[in-house]
Amino acid sequence: SQTIHQWPATLVQPVGSPLSLECTVEGTSNPNLYWYRQAAGRGLQLLFYSVGIGQISSEVPQNLSASRPQDRQFILSSKKLLLSDSGFYLCAWSGKGYEAFFGQGTRLTVV
Amino acid sequence: GQQLNQSPQSMFIQEGEDVSMNCTSSSIFNTWLWYKQDPGEGPVLLIALYKAGELTSNGRLTAQFGITRKDSFLNISASIPSDVGIYFCAGQGFGNEKLTFGTGTRLTIIP
């Protein structure tokens, strides 16, 4: 069966520090991969999605970037975090059907 | 990015009551999905709908794909405490790789 792993679960980082969140999927090949951000009590904002290795589409211009170095690995990065980057970050995958499955999320607090 | 209009934004009900929520879009969708998110966790897929007019149940949950392809409905019968959470609809258009999420309905059960 397919599983998705996302880490770390929580992270506290100072303003101006770099960020790297990692997501991996097991049990499937060539998945579509997504990064979402959720502000407290709010909906899901799509940040990046990828349909294949090295193929990244950005939905919202910001100081975040994403990379897909391997088929089942998706990384969210920042060179310098802002206070406004705080939030709940969710990785998700889907097959070539349309159902997306989410990781457990990373709670990022920028202080 | 585009978002679906989901209503109501929040609901306060008593245990045992039935719940109805809906999602509307200005665009036609090929697929409708309904998710539930518990606090601090990623959303979990509840029901997937693929055909206009389709009515699908999952235990006490029933969802429908609107005939116009621009809306979907979720009903929960005889609510119980574990139904508390945020419910999201999501839709995908024809030939579109990414899901568009609704703004969420927060369900609270009053003791």
Image (cartoon, rainbow, N blue to C red):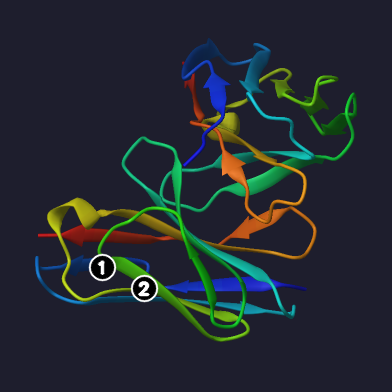
The image quadrant of residue A21 is bottom left
x and y, in percent, of residue B62 in the image: 80, 26
Q: Residue at x 20, y 58 (%)?
A: A109
Quadrant housing residue B14: top right
Does dot 2 land on a helix, a strand or a loop? loop
Can residue A47 be seen here?
yes
Left or right: residue B57 versus residue A28 is: right
Q: Does A5 sit above or below residue A89?
A: below
Q: Where is residue B31 in the image (x, y as percent from the top left)?
A: 77, 40
Residue at the spot of label 1? A11
A16 or A25: nearer the viewer = A16
Q: Could you tell me which residue is drawn at 41 percent across and 50 percent down?
A: B40
| Label 2 environment density (alpha carbons within 10 Å; few <14, some 14–19, many ≥20) | some
In the image, which disc is placed on residue B5?
A: none
Q: Which residue is drawn at 68% across and 56% down?
A: B97
Name the amino acid, label 1.
Answer: Leu
Which percent across, then down, holds residue B1?
Answer: 46, 42
> Circle 2 is placed at which residue position?
A8
In the rendered image, the vertical position of residue B79 relative to residue B2, given as above or below: above
**Label 2–label 1 contact, CB within 8 A:** yes
Q: Which residue is drawn at 50% across and 15% down?
A: B11
Which one is in front, A22 or A69?
A69
Q: Residue furthest bottom?
A: A70
Between B34 and B15, the one nearer to me in the picture? B34
- Kindly identify the amino acid type of the residue bearing the numbered disc 2: Pro
The Cα–Cα distance between marks 2 and 1, rounded to whole angstroms, is: 7 Å
Check disc 1 and report its element: helix, strand or loop: strand
